[in-house]
Every structure is written in C-alpha cells, then in structure tokens.
Image (spheres, rainbow, N blue to C red):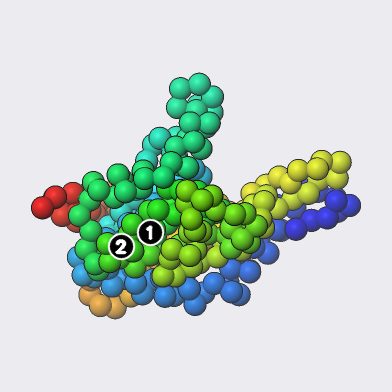
Amino acid sequence: MTTATAPVTTRTWIDLARDLLERLADTQLPAIEQASAWCADAIEAGGLVHLFGTGHSRIPVEEMFPRYGSYPGFHPLAELSMTFHTQVVGANGQRQAMFIERMPGLAEVILGNFTFRPTDVMMVFSASGLTAVPVEMARGARARGMRVIAVTSVGQSMSGTPGPEVGSRLLEEADLVIDLCTPPGDAMVHVEGLDTPVGPGSTIANVAIVNSIKVRVAQLLTERGAMPPVITRASEVGAERSRALFEGAYDEHARRIARAIDKP
C-alpha cells in the first residue's frame, strides 16, 4: 500500500495490484489447488459447482460461466436484488441492495429453489464475509452436505464483528478458505491530502482466483476424459466449430441445471 507521502501516478494502482497477485501466488496456491480438486470432482460426477456472491462479489460469479473460455459445470447464482447496482439511487438502488443482503433467512429461501447433491460444491464470495446472506448461504450449503469454499478477505473480515443476527463470519462457515489478501478497507491507495483510500483490490483478486481454478479444473477434467465443451470464439476455432461448442456448452449446462431445479 502507498503511504501518504508517496506520489500517486497512473501506474500506482497497477503496481499495487501486481503486489497483490504476488501475495496470492505466494500464500493461496495450496487452497486454490484444493478448491480445484473439489470442483473437478463435482463436475466429473455430473454435478455442479454453485457460485454465489452479493454486491460486487457478483463479478467472479459471472467470470466463471458463461463467457468465452469457460465451460459448464459452474452454476452462477446472482440475485439481482443484491447485485444490480447501476441505478444507485431510486428504484433498485444501492441502499436497498445493501439492506437486502443483511436480511437473515433470505439465503434459505434462495437455497430452497434447488435440489443439491452431496457431491456438489458451493463457492461463496464476500470480501467482508460478515453480511447475513453470504454467511447463511455457506451455512445452508454445509447443512445440505456440500463442501463450501469461501473466497473472502481475512484481514477485512477480522477487522469487523458479525452482527448477532448472523452469528459468525463466512470464513467460519466454510470447509476451505481462499484469502483475497486485500487490506481491511479493500481500497489500496492513499492519496496525499485525502483521508480515505481509493482503488479497491478485491475484484482483481477474485478474478485471478476463479480463473486459476477454471484452468486447473480444465486440466484435471481433460486428464480424466470428462471435460465439457468450452465456449470459444470463432477467431480461435472457426465459425462452425465455435457455434457447435456454444450449443454444446449451453445444452450441457441446461442438462445439469434441470436436475438442480427438478424438485422431488
């Protein structure tokens, strides 16, 4: 992190982001490897890796699937009431989103829409790891027999106190924790004359983590002969092959999701 006297330039945040990625590589690779193994097992078994985050933690959820260079087996769970921020004020505003993500009991309502397999995995993203919905999502997933991976900032989480209505931190409800390695305030740059930091680091850390998992899982599944089709641009494989991969990936995703929403 810069100091109050360090000059801030257009590369300051980039340098700090590079440092952040180095910390991730130095400290989190064993956890990322374990997460990758669990995800590969779930997808090979015909199941799903469920991904959930509120607020800006929706970004890594969408990074995993669907987009070019991604493949089915990852199930993005994005509740618009807690992730649609661009209107900021008024209807669908940020105040409402922040209020909703603190509502105890909502995670159980969300989980109640799906049928989960014990072989499935739940990955929950929350930089603070203190708000009710992500914490209870992890708690509910474990109660249903799933392995839970928490992607959170340990420093940020430990700098706050969970409310009595929540009772615990996300990192305490998980079987495996991947630390974002971001500072307690998330923002990484201190500008001289400004008493509040700017430039959050959690997004780049989240995206680095999930893409590391994505490519490692692809290798594991390919070695096992269980790799689903990868959504790939026509510039890489040609128009016909690109269309076939797109349709194959979406059909495979639909097949897996159909089982998850087929209530007994």
Coordinates of residue 245 in the picture (x, y in percent): 24, 55
Coordinates of residue 55 in the picture (x, y in percent): 49, 43
- Residue named by callout 1: 139
Three-letter amino acid code of the residue under disc 1: Arg
Q: What quarter of the picture does the N terminus occupy?
A: bottom right
Residue 173 lies in what quarter of the image?
Answer: bottom left
Q: Is residue 228 visible?
A: no
Q: Residues within 10 Å of mark 2 (few under 14, many from 20)?
A: few
Looking at the image, how many numbered discs can be counted on the residues? 2
Coordinates of residue 195 in the picture (x, y in percent): 80, 43
Q: Residue furthest left?
A: 264
Q: Name above or below for residue 67 compared with residue 103.
A: below
Along the horizontal axis of the image, is 204 left or right of 235? right
Three-letter amino acid code of the residue under disc 2: Ala
Q: CA distance from mark 1 to mark 2?
A: 6 Å
As helix, strand or loop, the secondary structure at mark 1 comes to helix
Asked whether disc 1 touches disc 2, contact meaning CB atoms under 8 Å apart, the reply is yes
Residue under the point 65% across and 57% down = 159
Q: Residue furthest right?
A: 5
Q: Which mark is residue 18?
A: none
Q: Residue furthest top?
A: 90
Along the horizontal axis of the image, is 11 left or right of 257? right
Q: Which mark is residue 143?
A: 2
Q: Residues within 10 Å of mark 1 (few under 14, many from 20)?
A: many
As helix, strand or loop, the secondary structure at mark 2 comes to helix
